[in-house]
Amino acid sequence: MRWVTAIQAWTGPARPIAAIFAYRPGESQERQGAMDILGWLWWALASVLGLVWWLLGLLWSLVWFLVSGWVSTLLQIAILVAVVFFLKYGWQRAPAELWRRGSAFARFSWKWLRASDGEAAPRAIRETVRVVRVKEFGDVNISTLMSLLALGGLAAFAALH
C-alpha cells in the first residue's frame, strides 16, 4: 500500500485516461469542448462498430455450427472419391479425370440449382408425318389390344385346366 501512495504523490491524483489526453493547459474552453465532443463521438462510433462486429461473429458462429457437419461430410466424400480415382487411374491421369468429371458434375449441379434445362440449344421442332383426325376402320389403340390379350390369356388358361 505504501508504494501506491508514493506513485500517487509523484503523478498526482488518479484521473481517467480520456481526461488526461483531452486536457491541454492553456487552451480555450471552445477548443476543449470540441475535443470532448470528438472524444465522445469516437467512443460512440467505436462502441457501435464493436457491437456490430460482435453480432456478426455470433451469427457466423451459429451458421458454422449448423453447416460444419455438412462441410465435414462433403469433404470426406470428396477425399474418398479422389482416393478411388487415384487408385483407378494412377497418380498421373487421376487429376485430369477428376477435373473432367467434376466439371461435368458441377455444370449439372449448377443447372439443377438454377432449375434450367440440361440442353443449352432449343430443340428442333419435328415435322408431323400424318395427322389422324377420325378413326378409320381397323384402328385399335394399344390399351384395348393389351386388355384383349389379357382376356385371351385368361380364357386359354381356363381352357387348359
Image (spheres, rainbow, N blue to C red):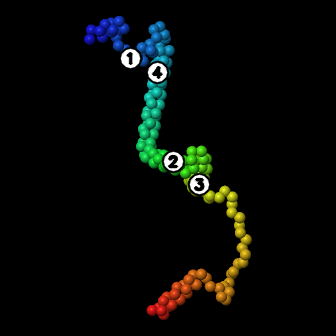
Query: Residue at left 55%, top 51%?
Result: 88
Looking at the picture, tell me which residue is in the foreground, 107 or 156. Answer: 156
Left or right placement of residue 37 versus residue 97 in this view = left
Q: Nearer the viewer, mark 4 or mark 3?
A: 3
Query: Residue at left 35%, top 8%?
Result: 12
Query: Residue at left 46%, top 37%?
Result: 56
Which of pointers 4 and 3 lies earlier in the amino acid sequence?
4
- Residue 96 at x, y = what percent? 61, 47
Which of pointers 2 and 3 lies earlier in the amino acid sequence?
2
Q: Give the labeled residue for mark 1.
A: 16
State whether residue 103 is above or below residue 139.
above
Amino acid type, label 2: Val
Q: Give the labeled residue for mark 2.
A: 83
Left or right placement of residue 99 versus residue 24 in this view = right
- Residue 129 at x, y = what percent? 73, 75
Which of pointers 1 and 3 lies earlier in the amino acid sequence?
1
Q: Nearer the viewer, mark 2 or mark 4?
A: 2
- Residue 82 at x, y = what percent? 53, 47
Label 2, label 3: how many angstroms apart (C-alpha)? 23 Å
Amino acid type, label 1: Pro
Secondary structure at numbered mark 4: helix
Amino acid type, label 4: Gly
